[in-house]
Amino acid sequence: MKRLFSIFVLSLVTVAPAQAALKIQSWKLANGTRVLFVENHSIPIVDLNVQFDAGSRRDPDGKAGTASLTNAMLARGLHASNTPLPEPAMTEAEISDQFADIGAQRAGGAGADRADISLRTLSSRAERDTAVKLVARILAHPSFPEDFFARDKARTLAAVREDETKPETIADKAFWRLLYGEHPYAKQETVPSVEAITRDDLVTFHAKHYVANRAIVSLIGDVTRDEADAIAQQLTMRLPQGESLPELPPVRLSAAHEERIEHPASQTHVLLGMPALSRGDPDYFALIVGNYVLGSGGFVSRLMHEVREKRGLSYSVYSSFNPLAQPGPFQAGFQTQRAQTADALRVTRDTIATFLRDGPTKEELQAAKNNLIGGFPLRIDNNRKILDNMAAIGFYNLPFDYLDTWTSNVAKVTIADIKAAFSRKLALDKMSTVIVGDVK
Amino acid sequence: MKFRIAAAFAGLALSWLPTVALAEIAQEFMLKNGMKIIVKEDHRAPTVAHMIWYKTGSMDEVNGTTGIAHALEHMMFKGTKTLKPGEFSKRVAALGGRENAFTNKDYTAYFQQIEKSKLNQVMALEADRMANLIFDKDEFSKEIRVVMEERRWRTDDQPIPLVYEALYATAFNAHPYHHPVVGWMSDLQSMTVGDARSWYQHWYAPNNATMVVSGDVDAKQVYKLAEKYFGQIPRKAVPVTRSQTEPLQRGIRRVTVKAPAENPYVVLAFKVPTLRDVERDMNVHALDVLAAILDGYDNARLSAKLVRTDKVANSVGAGYDNIARGPSLFLLDGTPAKGVTTEQLEKLLRAEVERIARDGVSEDELKRVKAQLIASQIYKRDSIFGQAMEIGTMEMSGLSHTQIDRVIDKLKEVTADQVKAVAQKYFSDDTLTVATLVPLPLTEKKAPPAGLRH
């Protein structure tokens, strides 16, 4: 019953790497792996993740879901190996029990650009060594057992079918397809695309993408620089070298479309937006400061004020930028009871149009800076948050002083910068709209 | 809900990790007006979590105005004698803060996360709305529409939440856990600004509130600030919620929910005890360990058997939340695999508990569950917000935050025999409620396939 759960969600997509007085050390291993490390002895734990260019944008044609299924199946079993060391096969149950016995926590997943595996472990030597070695083997020796593959595929299909009944996910998938057309970012799991995936596809995908020369290890916690280096080596020493990956096609701005999908839910779900922002784009700070005013500033944004506070049309309404390797979407969204769909959409569009035309007021700009700069310490106040920032810096090759200059970059933004950046990246008549629910 | 024993408890002593820097012990103070102040110092980063917990939630509501505790929570952002509607959030935002609030069955809580030097300013804001909230009819009528949208979004259009709403309404007849926190839609439709005002006047008092602060602060300094901002707010006579004891359940109850969905789902709820006496309630601790053995880690029993080995379910789980003001349920749930019915899955889930009742659990499993318990006590120190949450929920249930570590000790004492005994004792038909989702096809046409546009 949180009053507004979306502010947390949004902060994940709109917030970028950050920090001052947080020393990131970085180096490259002989096998090409890049390492980012923050030494922090305040709690006896280590948090790490290993990322690869193995997100859904690399899904084979017609087989959307391969990246995600590959990642999900890494720990379903290990094959025996002799290089570089003799190591036995392991079952999924043995892997899980071993992690559980030492209290280690493993997670992972595949997004549009990147796929990763992450680990939280106690920093004490025995636990840490066991956990790191197990993660290293999961990255290098997955056996993708045939029977588990069949089971996981069936579970994935059940989940995809479930998603196809839910207005949120129907809208989300339609939105990406509409914005990205032929580009890989448009790839969305469907029943036929998952049915087309074979075990061989996973083996091939894994061999091609989980490679040492494209691995990025981020690590924070209770170890020294030398220990971190040894951990990074241990994590990647079993991985092969990979050939370079094909360039992805550029994101082409397609004409604005409106897609209406009938759904019996009591609320209509609406998304509108367009491809907009890449990581490292010089407009980045102007856009996030401006968007704070428009739709990401929790209860104080213009969209929240106009749609929810003033008119009571929706519980959640927001706008966000999702910066990716190539232009990721700007999106605004809300949900409202069926009869109010047209009203809420009109208010949302008007609010965006006014902002694009006039930009923020002087007071709004100051309020945005006060929040972003004043709240900066909250972005880096625990290991998990810092690790997320490090991972983004590492994967997207953001400058290492990004952390130190974040607040001053926010401080520099002017109203003119915001207006110029928004008009370079967005135009209301180029935004596509997805409406799921009442389409009359 | 999974592995709550791991996620929800604090801990300090770790005998097998002698080098561990010990966490600070939370300190407790009481203002003269009866407001409790609990401070957990944690100096890792220059930030603070500040929370005000009111011991009033949906279980204090009466029929006809269900959802009022949550609606009032929304109104707490709508202005005081000196602040315009929305001004509270503007000020917190200007300080760089993040804020929100949440209402549950047992409590209503408000929080800000903020850089430490701003703590006094958010305290002043919370003190203001504890005493000086105003109730504007127009603001209320807009906000209650937002609440109705929230209900549509979170419950009416969501099959699984609909199942849980039906489960609680079926498992509890007399106890107010019968009602959903957000309230029934017709109660929201007839709710008035007067209902909200009356709720506020009755329950929002310093002697019904607990402040929890965690982060980079000095405890005594926080106490002084609390005294400065909240000390002048007068104590009130707070109503006593009548105890509406749930009568003994005398046989299995079933409820079915039909809703647009793809996969069926079933949840089984057994009536079990709530934690009241940390030292004596060994059955509660044993049930907690039982939940972890069933579903506390990837290869725990339910998943290992039903998802991994027999492939009869797409997902399964067990949950037991025993920190509460009211009664507790032990839940088993799952989505069957294709070709398996919910009736079959129901039997298979119960069979796993019966297997423990018959054969017990292994020492390896017990050790594994405890290893995670110990590690999770250290992991949780990474989040000051999580630590403040833990203190608040413990206090609201009627237990003291000082017992958090003691609960861990008691869990470590649980034996295999005790787990077996509770598996035998609490899982009969007589106190069981089963709620089932029967998926309906979408009545209209489905989403178009990939690539198709119109």
Image (cartoon, coloured by chain):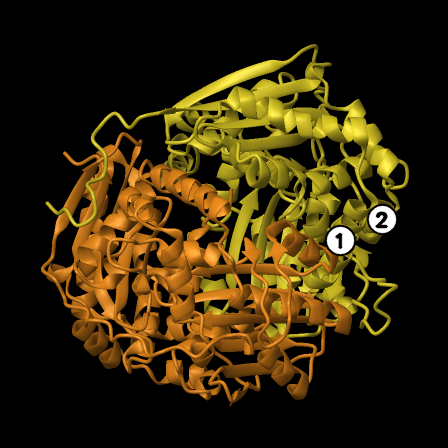
Q: In this figure, which residue is indicated by the disc labeled 2?
A: B412
What's under tag 2, amino acid-wise?
Lys
Tell me which residue sits at (41%, 44%) in the image. Answer: A153
User: Residue B284, relative to residue A198: is it above or below?
Assistant: above
Q: In this figure, which residue is indicated by the disc labeled 1?
A: B373
CB of mark 2 within 8 Å of CB of mark 1?
Answer: yes
Q: Residue A166 carries which label?
A: none
What's under tag 1, amino acid-wise?
Leu
- The hue of chain B in the figure is yellow
Q: Nearer the viewer, residue A382 or B176?
A: A382
Q: How far across and how far down the image is residue B407, in percent? A: 82, 47
**Is residue A288 found left or right of B16 in the rendered image?**
left
Tell me which residue sits at (62%, 57%) in the image. Answer: A90
Q: How far across and how far down the image is residue B430, in percent? A: 70, 14
Q: CA–CA distance between discs 2 and 1?
A: 8 Å
- The hue of chain A in the figure is orange
Marks 2/1 same chain? yes
